[in-house]
Image (cartoon, grey):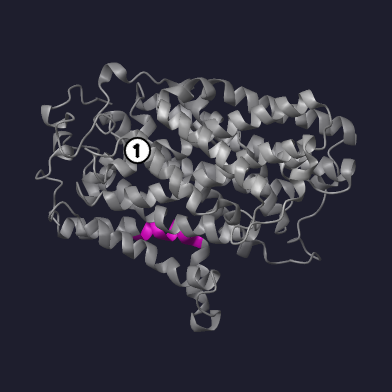
Amino acid sequence: MPYETTVPPVVGVESSLSNADLAPIPIESRTWGCWNFAALWISMAACIPTYMLASSLIGEGMNWWQAILTIFLANVIVLIPMVLNAHAGTKYGIPFPVYCRASFGVYGAMFPAILRALVACGWFGIQTWIGSEAIHKILTIFIPSMAHGAPLGGLGISMSQLVCFLFFWAINMLVIYLGINSIRLLLIIKAPLLIALGLLLLGWAYTQAHGFGAMLSQPSAFDPGQPKAGKFWSFFFPALTGMIAFWATLSLNIPDFSRYAKSQRDQVLGQAIGLPPTMALYSFIGVAVTSATVVIYGAAIWNPVDLLTKFTNPFVLIIAMLALCIATLATNIAANVVSPANDFAQLYPRLITFRIGGFITGLIGIVIMPWKLIADPSGYIFTWLIAYSALLGPIGGILIADYFVYRRKTLDLADLYRPHGKYSFVGGFSFVALIALLAGAAPALPGFLVTIKAIPPGLVPSILVDLYSYAWFIGFGVAFGVYIILRKLAPNS
């Protein structure tokens, strides 16, 4: 597939729609091969949330293989828009916000960029909280009084938890200040580090429990004669949607990474190798180790941080804390800072740099109080994951419809950076894309309002409530179709 081999003069940082972070990557700087992308995904997927991902599915009634298969299938599905959206980044060297300009307009691109950025801010907060909890829980072994602090009014966490959260947050901010290059070493060592930690836990659990325990043999709650018999599919599809949403964010802003690829083959093959297998393997490690903890400790311990606190060797605890912090830090910067930093730059490229965008991400990550987002496994799937998939699915549908169907993979690189070029549409905004976005998100709105208890279920027909379970799929399909129809009717709107 041919590349744009030159960068037109208008694309330089002198353009009001560009800066050094948004400008296309020159050919000579596109050096990522297949294994770079595989390593990137192994690094991001091997994390504590992945380890715990199956817990919400098993907790709601699935058996272990149903949960792992659901996770694997979801990641195969999300891989499709992932590699498709990566194509433009690889061909033209452009980041996600610039890619959005072709369909949403040079100024209208702020809408998908900000929606994506806000989701990343939520994930940034969640990962920061997880890292801080690793620090806090291991410190309580050395300082037991930290475990008994009273919750602060309005926050729901103790002072020591808040201090650990702000400390780990400050480390993230330091990395952002130093620049994205400072995380490269962490990403290189992080993947084997956390995989090794997971396999060591797996071996330890198998040895201590003389097997993996009853969890791997327990029946599904949806089997005949079980408490939820006959209700498997009514849970499977919202669960699948939630698992797709886990990486639906990256399926949009993958051009932020694929712009460094040497070829389309490298980004496609590398992502296929790195994403679905790692997600399935690390989720299985979480299930198997947790099953063994039932035998060893008499209760299921899903959180690996809680499990590590059962060890008493100070050396093991310190190494484990450092490993988990490095792993969480690396995932956080790669998955939850690179994109919003670029996305916020779309608002005001001359003022907002990668560093400033990263700081904005960090501040929003505090305000959302992420510990409340993941406190309830059911709420985590049905409120957080599915709710934002209802927005990201339509954006993905619009981007793919525009680039692959309408424009046949051909963009005018210079005009992506011109305020009055072919992508200015109406004052810099594409009303076709905005209407398609609203049309794609609308079917999930009634179900979302019922889920968060904003309106009583009786006021909404059950069929509309049920649509919420398929939010990503419906949003993607509706927005895709509406965009193609309207764009052909109004190519300049």
Q: Is residue 476 magenta?
A: yes
Q: Is residue 64 magenta?
A: no
Residue 370 position (above or below residue 290)? below
Residue 324: image location, x then y, percent: 64, 32
Residue type, numbered disc 1: Ile
Q: Nearer the viewer, residue 403 or 131?
A: 131
Q: Is residue 486 left or right of residue 291?
A: left
Could you tell me which residue is drawn at 40 percent across and 35 percent down?
338
Residue 190: image location, x then y, percent: 58, 25
Q: Bounds of the magenta span?
A: 470-478
Task: Kindly report the secondary structure that dominates the magenta region of the rendered protein.
Answer: helix
Looking at the rendered image, the quarter that the C terminus falls into is bottom left
User: Looking at the image, can residue 277 be seen?
Assistant: no
Q: How many numbered callouts?
A: 1
Residue 401: image location, x then y, percent: 29, 49
User: Looking at the image, can residue 437 be seen?
Assistant: yes
Where is residue 59, by image quadrant?
A: bottom right
- The residue tagged 1 is 356
Q: Is residue 381 left or right of residue 342?
A: right
